Image (cartoon, coloured by chain):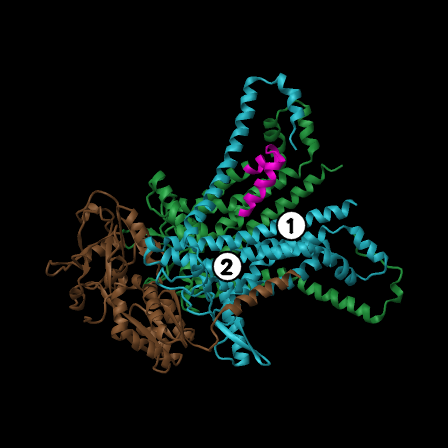
Amino acid sequence: MTYNSSKILLTKNKSLKDYIKENFGIIILRMLTWIVVLIFLFIIVIIFYNGSDVITWRFLLNPPSGDPQKDGIGIAIIGTLAVSFLMILLAVPIGILSAIYIVEYAENDRLKKIIRISINNLAGVPSIVFGLFGLGFFVLVVGKNIDTALSTGLLFGKPSLLWASATLAILVLPTIIVSTMESLERIPAEQRNAAYGLGASKWQVIRKIVFPQARPGILTGVILAISRGAGEAAPVLFLGCAFFLPHLPLTYLNVGFFSIPIINPAEQFMFLAYNVFNLATQSPNPEITLPYQYGTVLILISLVLIFNITAVIFRYKFRKILDEVTTF
Amino acid sequence: MNKNINSPYNKKISVKSVLLEKAVKYFFMLNGYVTLFLILLIFIFLLNEAMHGLNTITLGEFFFHKHQSAVSSSYVYQWYPTSSEPRYSLVPLIIGSLLTAIPATIISSVFGIAIGIYLSEIANPKLREILKPFIELFSSIPTVVLGFLLLTIGITIIGDIFHPASRLNAFLASIGLSLIIIPTITTLTEDALRSIPNDIRLAAYSLGANKWQTITKIILPAAINGASASIILGLGRAIGETMIVLMATGNAGEITINIFKSVRTMTATIAAEMGEVSQSSPHYYALFFIGFSLFVITFILNLIADLIISKMKLHLKKYDI
Amino acid sequence: MNFNAIIILFLFFIACSPNQKKRETIIVKGSDTMVNLTRLWAEKYMENKPNISIQINGGGSGTGIASLLNGTANIANISRELKTNEIEKANRLNIIPTKHIVALDAIAVIVNPENKVDSLTIKQLRDIFSGKITNWKFVGGIDKEISLFGRENSSGTYEFMKEYVLHDKTKNVFYDFAPSTQVLQGTSALTESIRKDKHAVGYGSLGYFAKKRGVKILKIVNEQTGYSINLMKNKNIDYSVIWSGKYPLSRYLYCYTNGESNNESNEFIRFITSKAGQKIVMEMEYIPLTAIN
């Protein structure tokens, strides 16, 4: 979308002053852009440069330790994945159903508008407020009441992986809803109408026509949500993040003869983003542990960026497929 | 568009399937309202806890009461909930939040809008295809990582250049904040610019305007709403951000307008003190009151941005022929 | 579908974990001063006890007490004694906080090595940290503004300074920390800041500073006798001034449990107070309860 043709037409009438003015402004814009791009590149390079030396299998798999030679982030990585997994499990079904309702069912425009506003605002709530809400509502109200009702002692009424995931699920819900809505809206109306014409009911259209096509778009939202949730430290600060866990918090599900170990959602967990915060502020020997801090940051940022880039590629492909469908 | 299309076979549909349709619809509806429900729930819950706080600490105490300074005879606003005579003034915290958020918003507006214009009007399409996702990728960098980098690298750079009054200061935090807001402002500005129909640009060129004139006189005024909405959203994000300010501001609760001094923000106060308070104490509810205030502030900012954007969309519709 | 892949990956991670036995868990919460020490204790203890899993949380002494009261911790690490109102509160909840002294800690006041000031009295410290003295020239230094560094109010060190330095015992007045104090999360962040700020002063556990280059530990002058008490002798910690009680800014570190009920917790604490446990205290540059060897 450059307008070279117009430039040629007009160059002759331009005064030198105008010429300088035009180029000066454009050069400034270009400069500002590249400054930011370079800062961003600098950040990535410096993390990779300083962090890559300590990345070994031992560092990735070992449990944490005070001894830098034995220290590892295995439990923090698994904790982060477990929180993300549970968060997705809670947020995705609700998010998808919600988006389908807004796009496919809701008819009242004013209502639609109110829901849209509430989505935007939920996305704008400060993450620390989610943390407050998670502690005050989930742990102290919901959890405590479940404990009293089921007389389970102190099982739900304490900060734990479950409540951290639930809090993060609310945090990422708007991400999932928005990208699901976007992918639903991209499906051409002709396809729906054709299905209706063949006698399909609304539910059938959603199930057979709309949803299968929107799936890659929805998956994009899910991946974006993981990358958002895995990096948030503020909401989980008081929701069961541990400084040091020597073992995975496991519990065993008995299925017939098998005893399947699963991560206990009622326990404390380790979280990479919280680890970064702890290491940066709590480490007894900053000179020695600095490379390990960079290593942890590197793993966290790789996790987030890999998910994010995957989502971007997915979205790109999804749009391309739909463009082909609509053009033929 | 496709809501009320009746299939010719409607009559043959059994009662069972009609019921299914109804059930499915209501099930979806239940989920459709979930965000509305959640935002109301959060609001009511925070309001309730904040009201508990107001039982023991008055609004006057939160906003207007000054206390005598321990070291001089002057009266100052103080946040000091753990003192033997607790003081709960939010004034230093609000000033702290603004002192980090406003410089961050100014910095990121300059850069964000410049990048938005550059990507939409100047950069060639191939470059844009690379740069835009790259910059957007940055909004996903965990803020704790930026906080870490500010503590390890940023602090030295800023210290060497500006020789600030405190090593950890509001300006350091606002650098970090602007890095996370720039992508937001860039994206929204670029979207606003790109939604302006090409005919307008072509018309300007044919009247003899050069590219710079077209940008400053024609395109920017048309996109000013989008840009201002993005700035407001950015401000909301800056006020609500926690980890960067917790790690980089130094958290001193002193009232100052020097951005090179240490400040304490609302978010950092919650993060630093929530772990320590005992439940149902005035301090606990005071923190919820801060949370409630943050919620209200960001809610209003988001609402304004929302209104501006929807107005802009209406406005742009006029261009469609 | 793609979700299956995620689930399989997740199960894979779980299957990878080699632990198959059910473990007894001890949850320790509390003082940030003690987290690194406790981690080392826990690691050494678990070497011989594979069926014990010790989880450690920081967050400050206040967090520790709160967790002991609401039952989310077995051991609360606290770097001060419980206040009477806290004990009353516990008793109302049918919890008997039982005190175990586990180590000694000395609070060191530190400055940048380029600072000319070597020693301060408690009164001078009080005036500096409460903001009455704002320039180094009033305490024998150069004409530069003092930059104050401190800890957040959930840390035990903060409470200790409030009680021992900011409390004017003769007048029985509690001063507050100056609002200009820069509050840092954790002692290591504080060390870093003081190393880089020539006019800074801060405080924290001796354990953190003893072998750190780039910070100078101040001598504390006894106001009555005029002697200045040095914590360091030939670059090593001089334990005798702390054990004898000459150094005014030292304190005990405590582990609180609920009664004597939980055997695992008590056994862990017995290990801590044993010779092996106290050796770890020395390794971490805290002060053992008695002389070892």
- Could you say where residue B213 lies in the image, as x and y percent from the top left? 60, 27
Which chain corresponds to the colour cyan?
A: A
Marking on residue A117: none
Q: Nearer the viewer, residue A308 or A179?
A: A308
- Could you say where residue C49 lies in the image, as x and y percent from the top left? 37, 76
Of badges 1 and 2, nearer the viewer stands 1
Which chain corresponds to the colour green?
A: B
Using the rendered image of the protein, determine whether residue A224 is visible from the camera's viewpoint. Answer: yes
Q: Residue furthest front?
A: A57
Kind of residue at disc 2: Val
Instruction: Report whether C273 appears left or right of A172.
Output: left
Magenta stretch containing residue C280, yes or no?
no
Q: Does the magenta stretch mainly form a helix, a strand or a loop?
A: helix
Position of the N terminus of chain A by quadrant: top right
**How many other residues sit within 10 Å of disc 2, few (<14), some (14-19) or many (≥20)?**
many
Q: Which residue is mark 2?
A: A129
Q: Which residue is mark 1?
A: A315
Task: Give the extent of the magenta segment.
Answer: B115-137
Magenta stretch containing residue B132, yes or no?
yes
Position of the C terminus of chain A by quadrant: top right
**Considering the numbered disc 1 on the image, is that residue within a helix, a strand or a loop?**
helix
Using the rendered image of the protein, determine whether residue B63 is visible from the camera's viewpoint. Answer: no
Q: Nearer the viewer, residue A132 or C286?
A: C286
